[in-house]
Structure formats: structure tokens, C-alpha cells
Amino acid sequence: MQKKRIAVIFGGKSSEHEVSRISASYVISKIPEDQYEVLTIGITKKGKWLLYSGDTAAIADGSWENNPDNKTAFLSPDSSVSGLAVITEGGCKIIKLDVIFPVMHGKNGEDGTIQGLFELSGIPYVGCGVLASANCMDKVVTNIMLKHSGIDEAAFTWFYASDYRKSPEKYLEQVETDLPEYPVFVKPANAGSSVGISKASNREELIKAIETAIKEDDKILIEENIIGKEIECAVLGNDDPMASIPGEIAPASEFYDYDAKYNSAESKLYIPAQISDELIYKVRVTALKAYRALGCSGLSRVDFFVTDDGRVLLNEINTLPGFTSISMYPKLMAACDIEGSRLIEKLIEFAYERSEKNV
């Protein structure tokens, strides 16, 4: 049987570049070698695309960029090409691709940007489409759509950074009117892995938190503080998706920030989550409802807060969740007996299924 050619794309210009590299190393290690020829395409922080053919370990530590055999390469948007254009000394070589596995987090990776290029190329790809990726990346849009769909969430308000700079007092008053009790959480609308998120317990901290968020995005979201357990649910599939057993996070820091997610061994994960069977069922049902409402496909991780009085509030949907050794998505799927190579194979199958549907 002839092997299919899969391109794993990693890196990118986002603040989650390093996590993307680690996730890519995991994904590459789980792709069945007897079925697929793997091409690895790294995107540097400056946005340069390179075809890398060295050791996978060098992807995780970042040294892949220094490989002398790297070749400039880019995905052709011409669907008649359906492949990778590689720049050589003699000109340009085309390498046909059967499927793409983007292992990219954050801006340009899971916000619909690169998904648009995949759509133009006509090559099947793993994960959500353009609109679902954009919807879920923008936390303001996500919140509005969830509210319209009748899904419980934290109270929120938002504004553009450009408007705030013109009239900061107006928008500080907006926050304190819409969310009358401190503390509140301030978030850039378009950033992943809790980058740029701060907790503010008074106006002075609110101002600092807004300035932190503005560094990441021009749209700022402020949410009420929810006291509850942090619960995550992995979803897999297209039109008839499955929701995993939910897991619970006991973060090492005050909340599950970037460092707690990727750098701290003290954060604890409990699978299944330490909540009642009734609440586990509610989390799974709500995860599927949100997944369908936002138009997701392939995979997503749906994050919740579960309060002591039994409220299940959706926090966010992550359309390309982390695939590191401590990441929740692969752990949750493993708890459902879908792990390693089997998980990767299913994701590829759903990529083909979605592509055939859209032809």
C-alpha cells in the first residue's frame, strides 16, 4: 500500500510558538509510520516557512531552525497544485500533499487565518474550518454566540482598545457598571493559553490589566469572577461528535495561566473530574451543544467552571488544544480508550470526511 503524505505544520508568529513546537513533536511521534510519509513544515516567529527534514527532537527545543538542510517552502493556494512549493537551486519543486495536520496555537494558527489557505489549497486538513476557528478564537464573539444559544456563561462586557485609549474613564465606568463587583478578569479577545489575562481586584489593577491585555489584541473582554472548579471536556468528530469524560484542573497558581498550563508540574489533573455524575453528564451535553453551535469539526477542548451550587458555565472553546505530554486533550481522549496513534488516525479520518462533504 502506498503511503499517504501528511504535512505537519508548526510554529508561527503567535505568542504560543513554543507550545506549538512541543505539541508538534508529540503529534509527529504518534503518526503511523507504516501509513504516512511525514513532512514537517516549520514557521518561524518572523513568519518564514521552512521544510525541515531533521530529528523531531530539534523541533521541541527550537534548534530545528538552524538546520542547514532547511528549504524555503510554502503551501500553494492553487487547488490544481494541491501541494507544497519548495524553493530549490534549480527553481521550484512541487510536493503533492494528501492531508495537512496544523499543530499551531493562537493567532494565525487557530483563528481561521491559515485555515483559509488550506481551503484555497483544496487539501484536507485536521481541525475546525475557517468560521468556527474565527468564532472560537474571538472570546467576545464566542460569548455572544453562546448567550444566543442559551448556554450559561460568566457575565461580561467588552470594548476596543482604540476606543479605550481615547476615553479611558468612559470604559472604566462601563466595566464597573456592567460588572459591579470586583474582582474581574481582563482578557485579550484573541489570544490563547491564557496569554495576557489578568485578575483585577480594584480600579488601579483594572487599568494595569487592560494595558496588559492591549499588548495582545485590540479587543478587550472583561468577565465577572466565577468561583468554581475548572473542568475541561474533549470533543472529537464532525456532524456526530463525541464528548469525553470531563477532567478537572487544580492549577498551581491562582488561575490556570500560561505558566501553570505548560511550565509547572504542580498543577494537578483529575480524570474523571471530581464532580457528581449529574454534573459530568451536564458538562458533556453542554460541550456538544456548544461545539455544534459554534460550527466546530474535527476536535476542540471545551472549558467550563462548575460552581458549588451546580451551575455549569462555559469559559471558552479551544479549537486546536495543546498536545504536549501534560495536555488535557490527549489525556481525556485516552480515558475514553482513544489514544496515541488511534487518536491521530481518527483526526485524519475526520479531516477527509469533512473535505469530502465540502466538495
Image (tube, helix red, strand yellow):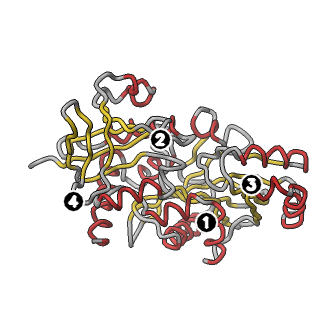
Of mark 4 and mark 1, the one earlier in the sequence is: 4
Checking the image for residue 12, the label placed there is 2
Residue 187 location (% of width, % of height) = 71, 52
x and y, in percent, of residue 8 in the image = 33, 43
Q: Residue 36 or 341: which is nearer the viewer?
A: 36
N-terminal of the pair, mark 4 or mark 3, is 4
Q: How crowded is mark 3: few (under 14 residues within 10 Å), some or many (20 or more)?
A: many
Amino acid carrying label 1: it is Thr
At mark 3, the secondary structure is helix
* 25 or 190: nearer the viewer: 190
Is 228 positioned to the left or the right of 122 in the image? right
Marks 1 and 3 sit apart, C-alpha to C-alpha, by 18 Å
Residue displayed at 41% across by 57% down: 115
Distance from disc 4 to disc 3, alpha carbons, whole Å, reads 42 Å
Badge 1: few (under 14), some or many (20 or more) residues near its Cα, within 10 Å?
Answer: many
Query: Residue beneath label 3, please?
Result: 161
- Mark 2 and mark 4: span between their CA atoms? 26 Å
Q: Given the current orientation, which residue lies at the most extreme left position?
A: 1
In the rendered structure, which disc, 3 or 2, sits on the residue that comes first in sequence?
2
Question: Could you tell me which quadrant the C terminus lies in?
Answer: bottom left
Q: Nearer the viewer, mark 4 or mark 1?
A: 4
Q: Mark 2, residues whose alpha carbon is within 10 Å: few (<14), some, or many (≥20)?
A: many
The residue under label 4 is 80
Q: Which of 354 and 268 is in front in this view?
A: 354
Image point 66% across, 74% down: which residue? 147
